[in-house]
Amino acid sequence: MNRQRWFSIAAILVAASMIFAACGTTPTAAPTTAPVATEAPTVAAAPTATTAASNPDTIIIGTTDKVASLDAADAYATHDWEVIKNISDGLLTWKPGTTDLEPDLATDMGTISPDGLTYTFTLKDGIKFGDGTPLDATIYAAQLNRLLTIGPKCPNDVADTLAVPYVKSITAPDAKTIVFQLTKTIAFFPQILAGAPYTATDPAIFKADACNLFPTAPIYGVGAWYIDSYNPDEQMVLKPNPYYTGDLKPTAKQVIVRFYSDANTMALAVQSGEIDVAWRILSPDQLTQLKGVSNLTVGTINGGAIRYLILNHTMKPFDDPNVDKAIASVIDRNEIADTVYAGQVNPLFSMVPPGFLGATQAFDTMYTAPNIDQAKKYLEASGYSASNPVKIDLWYPPEHYGASTAAWMQIIKKQIEATGEAQVNLQAQEWSTYAPALTGGKSYGAGVLGWFFDYPDSSNYLDPFVFNRGEGTNVTLPASGSLNGTPINDKAKQLVDLLNQADSETDLTKRADLYKQAQDLYADLVVTIPLFYQAEHVVYQSYIKGSSSYASPETLNIGPNILFYYSLITKSSQ
Amino acid sequence: MSPIAIIALIIGVPSVLLLAYVFARGSTGLRRYILTRIVLTLPMIFILATMVFFILRILPGDPVSSALGPKGTPEMIAHIRQTLGLNDPLIVQYGRFLWNMVTLRFGNSLVGGHRPIIDEMSERFPATLELIIPASILALLIGIFGGALAASKRKKALDFSLRIYSVIIYSLPVFWLGLILQLFFGVRLKWLPISGRIDAIIGTSLKTVTNIYSIDALISGNWPAFLSVLQHLVLPTITLGLILSGVFVRMTRINVIETLHSDYISAARARGIRERVLIYGHALKNAMIPVITLIGLQVAILLAGAVLTETVFSWPGMGSYLVERISARDYTAVQSVITVFAMLVALISLAVDVIYSLVDPRVRY
């Protein structure tokens, strides 16, 4: 056979395989058997479906998030925490769909010493890891101590934010009791304790002396699921933990988390039925389009993601309080929400979003924006005028917070310049350059940033911005060994004191009052300028349901803490 | 053995055999030429890797601050930079980078899970190979046969149509074509999957060895997985293949037309040989020589096209990996990927030269 004939045969084979593939099994003809990944694959058992709908035992969740770490002593990202909370439990947890706390592995909410420095919990009986290994307090405390020992050496370093500043020691006096000794009294410690870093980890997988960001599957915890297999760029397969004794028993036989590099592809995937649920992060345009698709539901979760302007008070012209107040007086948040986001975001008048303890509308009360006359008065008090306008460099990252950022930054520029006494030079910079330049406190005077809480408490919307050091606003760099720097002026000192008091106040009414006062001072100092808060959205097929036993079934029981419990979703047969 | 080692063997063993064959059968000039090319390839990759290393560090931006955003306190940033070795003097970092390149370990990623680059590439590189090989075949099939057909029907409607096709398809943006195909075949007709390399559920039953899923499915006899992989390949392959086919259509057409004017073709025609045999049996074979050169040159364009195709189809290959890591300033990942791409282009370019010498015995080095 000559070379040309071989070439022809190869060409025909390739073309035939393409046609064969194109004419392959259509979605509607698919059988429903789900394979068991731990078993050797067999041709007979393997399903041939190409859509999620036809497999009632498997729920496929799409996300554009990536796994950065599966080690609870290291992970510091929303999606990592979601996975960790699904495969393991902590002493306390949030009731699904809410930020209300309830005991999880603990028998009750624990006891607090009178000085507020010691928390004692008793462990429930019969807790086991997914491989059948029992969990007792000694093992649990030893694993939690990883946060204090190796945690700060791990790459994502959650420990330096959520453990080291607060926890002095974690001990187990007996097999049932765990004791936390804190470095200072902090009223919100139970909220921190309910988070992923404080879940029980398997000592066989997560050793005491090493971070293990990507352990080999299977990965067991004491939660409702275990990770059966995963490929960080493609998908993660979770299966029910056979030893799970908690309240959130899975109904599906497996959950597959499918990773997308492009939100638009994920939107098309949920539209075409390749996935059951699209969860984080779709753009307003994509959501608008998906809302019009029959068989799809778009659930809106009023989460805690906020956008704000940061003004560096150590740089000109923002070291002048009148300039800061003038900007705060002109920003019309409703125009941004309506014009750019078609009402899909909500105006934010305090850094603490509505629904959190003591949240106020401090910026609205104080500046009644847009108030151009008032802004002019502030600027004129500092000697600015139409012939001598204040010059402002305003920075933003064009992609990191979505393609709409440029549009609403233009609106802010227009609003500031409407005073006639300000010139705004709007500048875009790619995120990896922008972030260090802005937060480093030395290069950019003003820019936009986003924030999402580490734990659902008002303190996490105020403390980081007042004690922010690098951003150069209200406190100086701390001395070695100290947690907080020195406030830059008397009002800043008053604010720092108020927040310290609020953080340690256990009486909720008094604490709320302290936060209210703090927000007033915050607005007066214009530490940052809150702009709007964004809802999160989950898009799901009509055959997917949340649990009616818990809050927010319409958002698949995802509450303001943005925690998705995979156990609570069910899938009806097609 | 890691998947990337298996793939290196799959590519390496035939390459070495080919070289051995050429060395045994080729002229002294050819042997000298190949040796010179190999020797020159090494400093070329070294210079390129060095340039990438320093350019990345000259660019503003920092992987740690970028990853932490507003949550990064100065202490955290300093600590993580220290852990990752970013506080070391530049020359120390450069030395470490070169050593990692020489040993093909590539170091660890600076963002996300800080995984070894070699592990990440083991997952990503096979995916890219699985995409670009069928896309290249498709581009060549359309290009060569389309070009020959256009030449045989010169100045007729089919010729004009194919010329217009080649211009339009070459100028289409990859992401646009991909999106249109996704919307039509995936969303509207629901015939084909629009993302990923294999169905999510079927993928759980696939045991991977090479990470080239079609091969893995064949090895394990997992036919549903094989079918699913083919289904998932259709749209990205067509997208990338069609875009690349335009230039091949034009190149083949011109070369076939030129060859058809040669004396030996006129002589053959005078002897009464049928026109189809003349074109496909004689002219096309000779017209292929410049096309082979073009194939070598198109490798870099193919990889660039793969970057966009992979992003549009959420295809977890080297292209989408490069895009993700450039924006995160993941120095080690970016410099490793670019070095591997450079090695690939150099290797294929060398292979093309060698094949060229085999195809056209008139070529002297």
Image (spheres, coloured by chain):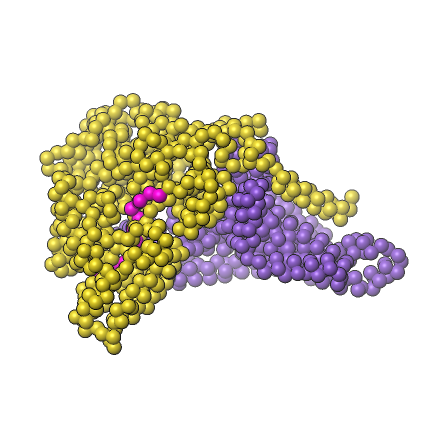
Query: Looking at the picture, how far across and down is residue B297, in whole percent?
Result: 61, 59
Q: What stretch is highlighted in magenta?
A: A300-314
Residue B24, given in percent of the width and then of the height, sits at 70, 51
Q: Which residue: 68% across, 42% down? A: A16
In the picture, measured across the screen, residue A76 lies left or right of residue B45, that is left
Residue B105 part of the magenta-drawn span: no
Nearest the camera: A304 or A200? A304
Residue at the limit of the structure toward the top, as seen here: A126
Please report the residue visible at 29 percent of the width from the left and 57 percent of the height from the top.
A333
Residue A313 covered by magenta stretch: yes
Left or right: A490, with A11 as reference point: left
Total numbered labels: 0
Answer whether residue A401 is visible to the viewer in this image.
Answer: no
Q: Is residue A501 left or right of residue B224?
A: left
Q: Position of residue B58 (x, y in %)?
A: 39, 63
Q: Nearer the viewer, residue B93 or A24?
A: A24
In the figure, the shade used to draw chain A is yellow
Q: Would you place residue A421 above or below residue A521 in this image?
A: below
Percent x, y of residue B365: 69, 62
Res B13 → quadrant = top right
Quadrant housing the N terminus of chain A: top right
Res. A275 visible in picture = yes
Residue located at (35% from left, 43% from top): A300
Compared with residue A446, is residue B348 higher up or lower down, i.e. above or below? above
Colour in which chain B is drawn: purple
